[in-house]
Image: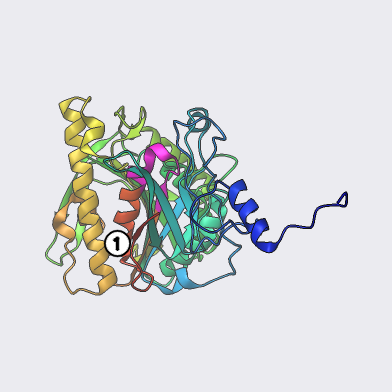
């Protein structure tokens, strides 16, 4: 007849949808367009070689929510935090993508692009758990409030507090510690709080030195060479180190800027302006009359970790510097692990860095490590090395879930 055709049955509708979405052997896709949960399925990072917006590639979405106030950082003896920096303008121009996903306030996932022998591309997911995880939008003030401010309480409880930044070159360590005029770093914020809490019978003494190629140099005394000596009471002393009395935070910041300008820097295959030394700033609170130590705050800007492959095009001296840096970082990791696990013996004699920081590993002490990572796809291997180093320091795992998953 000339009437309208009958409506299609449910089976015919499913076949039409099946053909519309590619016609494979599986069931048709769901009509609900809501994104998948981050705990079960992760977005595949786009191929840096593919054109922008290529089909089949989705940007990494951050599912981190606003965290409530927590006192976790103030209740532990050793705390490990991770800070993710934003992609730089040059990385965006090169087409690099963000491979770091923040799952919660304590967990993040690195989605590493891999390729099999048969050229099949897949993504390997590496999940890590830490005490704190900071997004690229978090400021230096947020990091100080949640990580470094509890250390000031330790100083005025007659203890020793240590805060240091770790990561590859160019990951934001110096920005986190030194800051900028628009965003103050941990150095200045900690100094201001210590000066404000200072009692009339107390004074502040500041020293600033570096460890370069296994040797110590005073950054506030024209890079005078220093020596490390241990006396009969097993107290490590830095012979020749000068101390400067500070009455306000402005004077302290001027000393820090002067000392930082004296640091050893060089060019490597990974960074054109790489810090080649560990800078150690010690803020000591002393009794004015007796000159007895009351508490100490140590802030360290570590040299960037690097692989041997990054220094193949450099000279012999640069490779020696890299070997000394990696040796001291390995010794530092072992000391912090011993501190966290409560071992009776702490191997602080493993390097000059851990020898001068012996007070940070014994007695009434607290340590905070801030691992800085780069989210770009070209720095994936460096980022994984940094996170594995930090993970071994704290040795945190969420249940018995595997650390890597392939999709």
The residue lying at 41 percent from left, 66 percent from top is 155
Quadrant for the C terminus, please. bottom left
Residue 110 vs 289, above or below: the answer is: above
Residue 235, located in which quarter of the rendered image? Answer: bottom left
Q: Quick one: 9 or 371, which is closer to the camera?
A: 9
Kindly tell me whether residue 58 is visible in this rendering. yes
The residue lying at 44 percent from left, 40 percent from top is 376
Residue 383 rendering spot, x and y as whole percentages: 36, 47
Give the image's coloring scheme.
rainbow
Residue 223 vs 58, above or below: the answer is: above
Residue 335 rendering spot, x and y as whole percentages: 23, 62
Q: Quick one: 239 or 259, which is closer to the camera?
A: 259
Whether 20 is among the magenta residues is: no
Residue 392 rendering spot, x and y as whole percentages: 28, 61
Numbered disc 1: secondary structure: helix
Residue 245 vs 404, above or below: the answer is: above
Horizontal side of 266 relative to 92 (left or right) equals: left
Horizontal side of 69 relative to 203 (left or right) equals: right
Q: Residue furthest front?
A: 1
Residue 305, located in which quarter of the rendered image? Answer: top left
Horizontal side of 25 relative to 166 (left or right) equals: right
Whether 376 is among the magenta residues is: yes
Q: In this picture, which residue range is highlighted in magenta?
A: 371-383
Residue named by callout 1: 393
Q: Quick one: 289 or 91, which is closer to the camera?
A: 91
């Amino acid at each position: 007849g000339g009437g309208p055709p009958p409506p299609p049955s449910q089976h015919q509708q499913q076949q039409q949808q099946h053909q519309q979405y590619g016609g494979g052997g599986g069931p048709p896709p769901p009509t609900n367009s809501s994104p998948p949960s981050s705990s079960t399925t992760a977005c595949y990072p786009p191929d840096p070689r593919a054109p922008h917006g290529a089909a089949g590639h989705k940007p990494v979405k951050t599912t981190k929510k606003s965290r409530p106030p927590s006192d976790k950082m103030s209740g532990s003896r050793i705390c490990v935090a991770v800070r993710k920096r934003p992609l730089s303008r040059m990385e965006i121009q090169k087409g690099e993508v963000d491979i770091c996903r923040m799952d919660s306030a304590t967990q993040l996932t690195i989605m590493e692009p891999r390729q099999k022998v048969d050229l099949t591309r897949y993504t390997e997911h590496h999940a890590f758990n830490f005490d704190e995880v900071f997004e690229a939008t978090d400021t230096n003030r947020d990091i100080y409030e949640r990580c470094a401010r509890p250390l000031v309480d330790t100083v005025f409880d007659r203890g020793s507090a240590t805060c240091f930044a770790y990561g590859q070159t160019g990951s934001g360590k110096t920005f986190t510690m030194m800051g900028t005029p628009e965003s103050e770093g941990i150095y200045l914020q900690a100094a201001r709080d210590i000066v404000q809490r200072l009692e009339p019978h107390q004074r502040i003494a500041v020293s600033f030195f570096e460890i370069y190629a296994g040797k110590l140099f005073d950054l506030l005394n024209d890079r005078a060479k220093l020596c490390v000596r241990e006396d009969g009471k097993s107290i490590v002393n830095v012979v020749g180190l000068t101390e400067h009395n500070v009455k306000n935070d402005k004077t302290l910041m001027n000393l820090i800027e002067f000392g930082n300008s004296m640091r050893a820097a060089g060019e490597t295959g990974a960074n054109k302006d790489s810090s080649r030394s560990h800078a150690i700033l010690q803020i000591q609170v002393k009794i004015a009359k007796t000159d007895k130590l009351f508490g100490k705050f140590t802030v360290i800007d570590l040299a960037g970790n690097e692989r041997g492959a990054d220094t193949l095009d450099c000279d012999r001296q640069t490779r020696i510097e890299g070997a000394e840096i990696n040796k001291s970082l390995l010794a530092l990791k072992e000391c912090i692990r011993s501190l966290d696990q409560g071992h009776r013996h702490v191997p602080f004699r493993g390097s000059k860095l851990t020898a001068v920081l012996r007070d940070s590993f014994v007695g009434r002490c607290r340590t905070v490590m801030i691992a800085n990572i780069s989210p770009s796809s070209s720095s994936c291997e460096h980022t994984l090395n940094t996170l594995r180093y930090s993970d071994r320091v704290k040795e945190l795992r969420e249940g018995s879930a595997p650390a890597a998953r392939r999709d």
